[in-house]
Amino acid sequence: MEKLTFYAVSAPEKLDRIGAYLAERLSRDVVRHRSGYVLIAMEALDQLLMACHSQSIKPFVESFLHMVAKLLESGEPKLQVLGTNSFVKFANIEEDTPSYHRRYDFFVSRFSAMCHSCHSDPEIRTEIRIAGIRGIQGVVRKTVNDELRATIWEPQHMDKIVPSLLFNMQKIEEVDSRLGPPSSPSAADKEENPAVLAESCFRELLGRATFGNMNNAVRPVFAHLDHHKLWDPNEFAVHCFKIIMYSIQAQYSHHVIQEILGHLDACKKDSPRVRAGIIQVLLEAVAIAAKGSIGPTVLEVFNTLLKHLRLSVEFEANDLQGGPAGSASLNTSSKDNDEKIVQNAIIQTIGFFGSNLPDYQRSEIMMFIMGKVPVFGTSAHTLDISQLGDLGTRRIQIMLLRSLLMVTSGYKAKTIVTALPGSFLDPLLSPSLMEDYELRQLVLEVMHNLMDRHDNRAKLRGIRIIPDVADLKIKREKICRQDTSFMKKNGQQLYRHIYLGCKEEDNVQKNYELLYTSLALITIELANEEVVIDLIRLVIALQDSAIINEDNLPMFHRCGIMALVAAYLNFVSQMIAVPAFCQHVSKVIEIRTMEAPYFLPEHIFRDKCMLPKSLEKHEKNLYFLTNKIAESLGGSGYSVERLSVPYVPQVTDEDRLSRRKSIVDTVSIQVDILPNSIPPDDVVDQGRLEEIRGKSSYAEANNTEEITFEALKKAIDTSGMEEQEKEKRRLVIEKFQKAPFEEIAAQCESKANLLHDRLAQILELTIRPPPSPSGTLTITSGHAQYQSVPVYEMKFPDLCVY
């Protein structure tokens, strides 16, 4: 061997003839089963190969690979292992120049077949499989870095290599389920365990993948998992994609996510458990990718997931509507449960992905999801709900709001305008999302996520009478100008949502708890003196509605509202720290504890609480009184004039057109000069008021505008008139919603002065205006005697009197 090596090194041009002779001898010995001579020939070839590194080695390599192929083709396991070992030695040699004509197709096929060996002897089977994996590893190392050579990244090679490795990885008895990248196995484990060696080779293969060939390496994984039905259960699938995500370069992570989304689309008609398995794999991939580069697929991920969420709800609705009777109904029930697994997996994935995004991207995703929620007046949402029906629509609303809740969790905006822009708040507070108690809960929880910028919500959890709010150590900052502007613009919307939410018949304890938390968070995060007064007006109006009960609420709900009012007034009185106010609230709560415990949250929300038969017989001292609150706050410098104005929720177009009952039939502005000054037995002569209405209408009819061509044109163009009327109504409503109270009051007062003279002239009445805002409007005439009439009871058409 020494002489042969010296001769080959001294005369490298003879290497090709040496190789050809040895190849001929080896081929003959393999056929004749002379294993000893085969071993000698391969040892000689190996030593020559390791010793010679000249340009003339290229022809010798061809002879060498031909002999390795002969060994691999033989049926004897020892010779196959021998050939593999020689090939691995060759693969570790770095050649000076690449050989562009050399191909390894045969070796890829043969090594892949060895990875699937089914030899009857377990030890020999393991040995052959390990040899096959090591051979694939050698092919990868030899070819993967050469860009110009025909590489193994072509699909026909990857379709053999990747499944072979995965087949051996499946033999791992305990699948690694850790979140972090698994530790590298020891050298001894690699040599003895095909599963460990296959995983190491798989990692090495993926680590060498580049932008152009990443997809070719990932797609065979899906084919293998589909063929072997490994999505349900999906432990092995999750394990594979963890390896993929940790092995590839971080900037290519979005390619894998795109491939998973594409496979999810391809499997949209598969069983729910298969889809759930794919989505859980996506969750694991997203969890790893979110720590690095997410790439341009953010909206694509959410769009695909929301599309599959709609499909899942549609399948569930179809099963419910067309579910067969008898024994088949059990299958329908199990399908529904499986679809819920899919839906929960989608929501969890959306939430995890959203929570890992930066704030600027998260706000875009919040708007994107909100745009998908089917609500009144938003035909722009792209989720097709035409086939879902009412039940399916409600289900998709709940699913989307749950997704939104996950995305908004932990979101911290510097200003509330950033967190709740008008384009997001309007659909969120839409009456379309108030038709079910679960929907209302989700809406309130989303609002809490966005409002709670100082993590106070956990301290407010549960509706209760807090003895000392200072013990909660609530964090708050001075209200900034942007937040004040937000409340001036959108405060009425928030108040309206809370007011109507309290009066729903299907409320449960959690609804009242969330409504209480909403009031408390607004007080902490957004309340100046003006907002505090508005919130007190709101809860007093809730108390009045519970007493009067125009909505015919059950007694539990009426007592629940009373308990909510007590809990909030106890909270706000301590927050603003006005002693007289705190004293009044504490006194009422103390009396309730003794005489009407069902008006307190600790009792009404307890099991088997005794309820009263009616609220009409209760004494006045059980209620929070407006005049007492106004007196206590007025003494501390608060502007309490507005407390005398009862809260009335603003009316939207959706109230008239939605399926829910309308609050009022017409838009009206009610202004109460002195609500408590008139005795209840005062009666207004209705006939006289009708006469007044008729005459005032006649007077207005005489005040017609000049007839011109433009006026006639407008009269003919009815569609234009309708648009103008609609715009006019919108401007009026918007003005009363958003304009400062003082401006509205001044305008109404000027109108009152103008109409004073008109009414007196038309009706020949003497109208004596009140000497102060706390007075009443007195109307007298020579024809009859009338009592004093409070202004808010005089409902003149198109007339607003302050």
Image: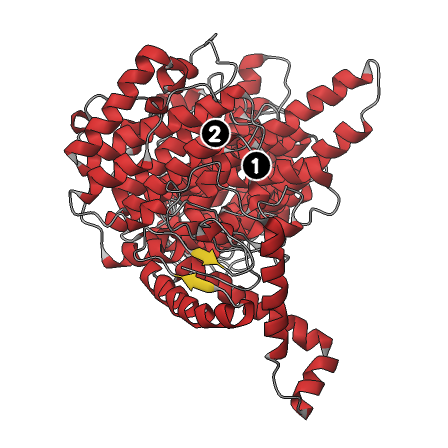
Residue neighbourhood size for the residue with mark 2, other residues' Cα within 10 Å, grouped as few (<14), some (14–19), many (≥20): many
Residue placed at 66% from the left, 51% from the top?
Answer: 657
Q: Decide if residue 702 is on the left or right side of residue 174.
A: right
Residue neighbourhood size for the residue with mark 1, other residues' Cα within 10 Å, grouped as few (<14), some (14–19), many (≥20): many
Q: Decide if residue 737 is on the left or right side of residue 278.
A: left
Q: Position of residue 574 (x, y in %)?
A: 20, 32
- Residue 398 has which mark? 1
Q: Position of residue 102 (x, y in %)?
A: 55, 54
Rendering colour mode: secondary structure
**Relative depth, front residue between 112 and 208:** 208
- Disc 1 or 2, which lies upstream in sequence? 1
Q: Position of residue 357 (x, y in %)?
A: 38, 48
The N terminus lies in which quarter of the figure? top left
Residue placed at 17% from the left, 36% from the top?
Answer: 578
**Relative depth, front residue between 94 and 164:** 164
Specify whether residue 291 is in view.
no
Mark 1 or 2, which is nearer the eye? 2
Residue placed at 57% from the left, 28% from the top?
Answer: 505
For badge 1, the amino acid type reads: Ile
Specify whether residue 601 is in view.
yes
- Residue 771 has which mark? none
Residue 770 in which image quadrant: bottom left
The C terminus lies in which quarter of the figure? bottom left
For badge 2, the amino acid type reads: Ala
Name the element at disc 2.
Answer: helix
Is residue 360 placed above or below 46 in the rendered structure? below
**Relative depth, front residue between 604 and 622:** 622
User: Residue lying farthest bottom?
Assistant: 709
Name the element at disc 1.
Answer: helix
Name the residue that disc number 2 marks.
546
Distance from disc 1 to disc 2, alpha carbons, whole Å, reads: 29 Å
